[in-house]
Image: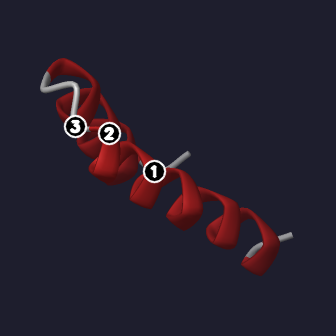
């Protein structure tokens, strides 16, 4: 996982930002499929 995404995730979890977490999860899912 790229560091920028890790940082965003940590921030979202600390803020308990459910919308952001969902968005980042989709980002990560897409990213994984793109770079296999």
Q: Where does label 1 land, which residue?
A: 22
For residue 6, side relative to residue 13 (left or right): right
Distance between mark 1 and mark 2 Cα atoms: 6 Å
Q: Looking at this rendering, what residue extends furthest in the bottom direction? A: 34
Q: Residue at x 25, y 45 (%)?
A: 8
Image location of residue 12, percent across then percent down: 23, 36
CB of mark 1 within 8 Å of CB of mark 2?
yes
For residue 24, side relative to residue 32 (left or right): left
Element under label 3? loop
- Of residue 23 and residue 9, the one placed in the foreground of this image is 23
Image location of residue 26, percent across then percent down: 57, 62
Q: Where does label 3 land, which residue?
A: 17
CB of mark 3 within 8 Å of CB of mark 2?
yes
Q: Residue at x 34, y 37 (%)?
A: 9
Crowd class of label 2 (few under 14; some 14 to 19; many from 20; radius 10 Å): few
Image location of residue 10, percent across then percent down: 27, 28
């Amino acid at each position: 996982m790229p560091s920028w995404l890790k940082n965003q995730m940590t921030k979202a979890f600390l803020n308990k930002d459910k919308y952001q977490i969902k968005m980042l999860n989709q980002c990560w899912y897409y990213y994984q499929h793109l770079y296999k």
